[in-house]
Image: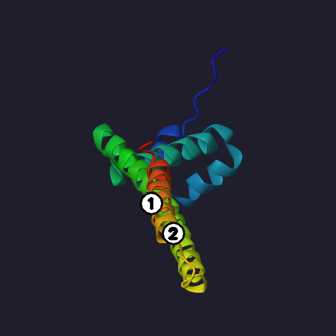
Amino acid sequence: MKSEVCEFEEAVGTASSSGLWADELRKHLAVCSQCSDLRLVSEYLASARLVDDAAPLPAAGLIWWRAQLAERKERAARAMVAIEIMQKLAIAVALVIVIVIGSLWKSVDWSTLLVGAGLLVSTSAVLYGWVRGRI
């Protein structure tokens, strides 16, 4: 089935692209669905061209590089949280050791103290490596 072409279609297309609408065309748009549709499509296409011209996409390599950089920053932030937790834990353990040594100062067995300090340092090193993902 062939649809009839409205005699105002060309005038509506010209007015859509220029933005200058005669009163007669405005009245015609209210009664003609073909011309109303043409106006909507013309305005949409004109706005789509403006959007395309206004914001060209960056190169694909640049988008990929930015995504990789964002991922690295996120991993670094997570690692910093783990490091801060381990630092606070180490300070708490050191304070407990100082309090224990202070209370047992006179009756301390120095060889046991040195073995305990060695175990503490080695355990801290293992925990630090585990948190950093190196173990």
Is residue 130 visible from the viewing direction of this image? yes
Residue 68: image tag: none
| Residue in the picture at 58% in, 46% down | 40
Q: How is the image coloured?
A: rainbow
In the image, residue 18 sits, relative to residue 91, either above or below, namely above
What is the three-letter code of the residue carrying label 1?
Gly
Q: Are marks 1 and 2 in contact (CB under 8 Å)?
A: no
What is the three-letter code of the residue carrying label 2?
Ala
Instruction: Between residue 45 and residue 56, name the one nearer to us.
Output: 56
Q: What element carries label 1?
A: helix
Residue 124, how many percent across, how many down? 48, 58
| Residue in the picture at 43% in, 48% down | 71
**Structural crowding at the residue carrying mark 1, measured as other residues with C-alpha within 10 Å and reported as few (<14), some (14–19) or many (≥20):** few
List the residue tagged with mark 2: 90
Residue 69, how many percent across, how many down? 36, 50
In the image, residue 22 sits, relative to residue 5, either above or below, namely below
List the residue tagged with mark 1: 118
- Judge left or right: residue 36 versus residue 120: right
Q: What element carries label 2?
A: helix
Instruction: Between residue 87 and residue 125, name the one nearer to us.
Output: 125
